[in-house]
Amino acid sequence: MYDVREELLEIVEETKQLHTRERSITLESVSLIGELERRNAAVNLSMTSEQFAVHIGLTPNQYWKRAQAARLIRFHPEAQKLLESGETQVSHLALIAPKITQANSELLLDGIKHKSKREVALLLSRITAEGDLLPAEATFELRVTLTKSQGELLDRAREVLANMRGGGRMPSLPEILVKALEDLLDKRDPLKKAERAKARAANSPSSGKEASDEVEAEADTVSNLASPGNGDQSPTKKSPSRPAIPAATRHTVWLRDRGQCTWVHPGGSRCPERGMLELDHIKMWCRGGDHSEDNLTLRCRRHNQVAAEQELGTGFMAQARKRAAGAASLAI
Ligand SMILES: [Zn+2]
């Protein structure tokens, strides 16, 4: 008698065996690629990594993932069982390869079983090299489109970061981004500069030279940010004889105002602006105000303008803008 169930079970069994074979073939491929990588095959056969990947029948991305998985299995052989059993896949091993350490390997390998790519990425963002699990933080996806030359910057940053960390571990995109942002803020954030200057002054009161060097760089940044028609530099243009604000004063004001606009709204709330800030003279320079800490405050561009209008009167400001426009064109 014809038995549908019997026949289906047979096909199911056949499929199951096929998938077992598929996993074992993948594993064999991973193992061979690992050997080719160790023996530097692409270089020795005078090919780029991309050419070599295509030559052996994979896309560069597939090749890269299998090479990463092979490296991981070499140092953490227990990962091989997860691939064999189908509890995880090559792409997940490639994802965790840059972050796995002896201390976190058990937690990490256990945590990727039967997980989606997104869940693996989330786990990676929480796990430390020491094997601790940080509280889950909300995540969001960031999509960027890069030109070829921008992509090359990213590739170079990846190489440099991989060299810095040693061990040939390729950093992930979020790791590259975070490191780049940390370096940028370390170098450019006026608040960090002020903190550094303060620490330096506390450690060695005689090292004034370095501090003044830093001011000049910072003064450049600020003048680049400030548009010429704003704040107390307008309507009377910044006089060439006006000295720069001393570094120590600048740093003190940034720290005191905690890198935020000090304008207080009528309701009593403080302006939250932390970007595009300018050092504003409370008593304007053109009216005899000086560069002392007490006469300086951080204001955003908009409130710098409002303060100037209050001080000089809106009529005066409007006339000044008109004069500026008239000088630029004959239309008015
Ligand atoms: Zn403001």
Image: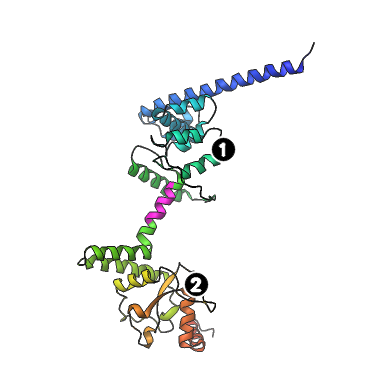
Q: Mark 1 or mark 2: name the one nearer the start of the chain.
A: 1
Whether residue 49 is visible, yes or no, is yes
> In which quadrant is the C terminus drawn?
bottom right
Q: Looking at the image, which residue is at 46% across and 87% down? A: 312
Q: Main secondary structure of the magenta part?
A: helix
In this view, the residue in front, 95 or 131, is 131
Would residue 328 be visible to someone looking at this image?
Answer: no
Q: How many marks?
A: 2
Q: Residue 58, image x and y in percent?
A: 50, 30
Find disc 1 in the rendering and name its residue: 116
**Residue at position x 38%, y 88% in the image:** 287
Please determine whether, in this image, residue 290 is positioned above or below residue 80: below
> Which range of residues does the magenta coloring cover?
175-183
Question: Residue 174's spot in the image, x, y percent?
Answer: 46, 47
**Mark 2 vs ligand 1: CB under 8 Å?**
yes
On screen, 239 above or below 40? below
Q: Is residue 202 left or right of residue 181?
A: left
Left or right of 222? Residue 207 is: left
Q: Which part of the image, by quadrant, shows the N terminus?
A: top right
Residue 180: say if magenta.
Answer: yes
CB of mark 1 within 8 Å of CB of mark 2? no
Q: Amino acid at mark 1?
A: Ser
Q: Which residue is mark 2?
A: 271
